[in-house]
């Protein structure tokens, strides 16, 4: 299957980077190269773009898409949480902009054998990086009922988490759960019919999200990476992050606030004595959301939010 993915908030994100000729930019979630391609177009043939992705299919697709830019592009198969090591290995100490698009790609969702979709039957996989040994099947079949409950409640924010976890454990005692279709049916059976009818949408959406987040450590990786990425920015460099659910957005919002105002002194202190200095400023006081036109063209953009932070180096 061809790697197709329509980048969300494309113009808004690339505009926010303030791309300059001769700059160095990092796309930490390269995907099919949609954001990277637009960044390169604005660099006027000068500068460098480093693309990072852990998905083998994305690497292949982006390599082909960005081929025309030759030596301006360096693509590395890794997780963006290792961005400092990636840049160190390339001899780069600072960059002018970083982009993260945290969404699951359309390709991943639409390719049933990747196991991300509750709409298509396929193996229960969900790995962003297929070099990993553990899959969603292992989580569903090997985690305790309490562990499953916490994951679905905390990462899926599903109020029926307890009943869903109970149903999963009951069904796996009969036979191992190995496909997305099996799991989707189990979740559906765990939620009252009148609730399903009232809410609309697929009842398994939140459970699939929760298991995917747990498997790929998505929230932990994000929490651990934001400070490092801000430190890697040159003066006036910008970090643009697109999130797709409230848990991610909350992490980004709070991390940006902490970097803008890290002072831990009591509010009644007349002057700061903790010595913690601001690393820059938040550009987006409210997140940027898709336009009505974009939502008409791409329904998967619906929950996306863009937040932007600008580095200010204080000597």
Image: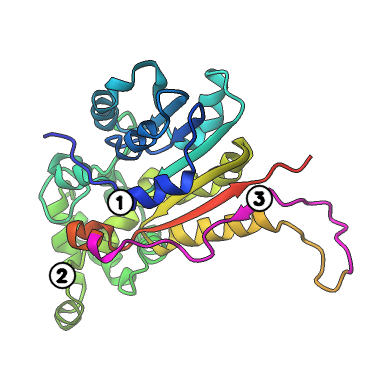
Q: Residue at x 28, y 46 (%)?
A: 7
Q: Which residue is mark 3?
A: 280
Alpha carbon distance from label 1 to label 3: 26 Å
202 is higher (above) or lower (below) than 243: below
Identify the main secondary structure in magenta: loop
Magenta region, residue range: 270-293
Q: Position of residue 235 (x, y in %)?
A: 65, 39
Q: Does residue 27 show up magenta in the picture? A: no
Q: For mark 2, does the 10 Å Cα neighbourhood hold few (<14), some (14 to 19), or many (20 or more) residues?
A: some
Q: For mark 1, does the 10 Å Cα neighbourhood hold few (<14), some (14 to 19), or many (20 or more) residues?
A: many
Q: Which residue is mark 1?
A: 8
- Nearer the observer, 87 or 238: 238
Q: Residue at x 83, y 51 (%)?
A: 275
Mark closer to the observer (3, 2)? 3
- Nearer the observer, 45 or 107: 45
What mark, if any, has residue 189 been given in the picture? Answer: 2
Answer left or right for 161 relative to 23.
Answer: left
* Colour basis: rainbow
Q: Residue at x 25, y 25 (%)?
A: 60
Q: For mark 3, does the 10 Å Cα neighbourhood hold few (<14), some (14 to 19), or many (20 or more) residues?
A: many
Quadrant of the rendering where the N terminus is positioned: top left
Mark 3, secondary structure of its residue: strand
Quarter occupied by residue 88: top right
Answer left or right for 42 relative to 280.
Answer: left
Alpha carbon distance from label 1 to label 2: 33 Å
Q: Position of residue 116 (x, y in %)?
A: 22, 48
What mark, if any, has residue 179 been given in the picture? Answer: none
Mark 2, secondary structure of its residue: helix
Answer left or right for 58 relative to 268.
Answer: left
Q: Is residue 156 visible?
A: yes
């Amino acid at each position: 299957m061809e790697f197709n993915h329509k980048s969300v908030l494309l113009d808004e994100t690339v505009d926010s980077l303030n791309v300059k000729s001769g700059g160095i930019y990092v796309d930490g979630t390269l995907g099919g190269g949609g954001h990277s391609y637009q960044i390169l177009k604005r660099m006027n043939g000068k500068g460098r773009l480093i693309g990072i992705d852990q998905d083998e299919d994305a690497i292949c697709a982006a390599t082909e898409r960005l081929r025309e830019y030759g030596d301006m592009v360096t693509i590395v198969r890794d997780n963006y949480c290792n961005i400092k090591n990636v840049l160190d290995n390339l001899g780069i100490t600072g960059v002018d902009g970083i982009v993260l698009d945290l969404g699951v790609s359309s390709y991943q969702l639409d390719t049933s054998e990747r196991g991300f979709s509750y709409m298509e039957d396929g193996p229960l996989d969900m790995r962003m990086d297929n070099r990993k040994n553990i899959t969603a099947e292992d989580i569903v079949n090997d985690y305790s009922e309490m562990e499953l409950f916490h994951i679905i409640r905390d990462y899926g924010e599903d109020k029926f988490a307890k009943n869903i976890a109970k149903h999963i454990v009951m069904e796996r005692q009969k036979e191992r759960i190995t496909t997305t279709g099996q799991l989707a049916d189990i979740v559906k059976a765990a939620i009252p019919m009148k609730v399903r009818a009232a809410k609309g949408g697929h009842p398994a959406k939140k459970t699939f999200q929760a298991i995917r987040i747990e498997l790929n450590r998505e929230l932990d990786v994000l929490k651990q990476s934001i400070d490092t990425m801000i430190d890697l920015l040159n003066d006036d460099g910008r970090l643009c992050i697109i999130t797709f659910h409230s848990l991610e957005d909350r992490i980004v919002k709070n991390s940006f606030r902490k970097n803008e105002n890290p002072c831990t002194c009591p509010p009644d202190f007349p002057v700061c004595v903790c010595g913690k200095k601001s690393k820059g400023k938040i550009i987006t006081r409210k997140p940027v959301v898709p336009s009505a036109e974009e939502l008409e063209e791409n329904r998967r953009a619906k929950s996306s939010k863009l937040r932007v932070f600008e580095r200010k180096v204080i000597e």
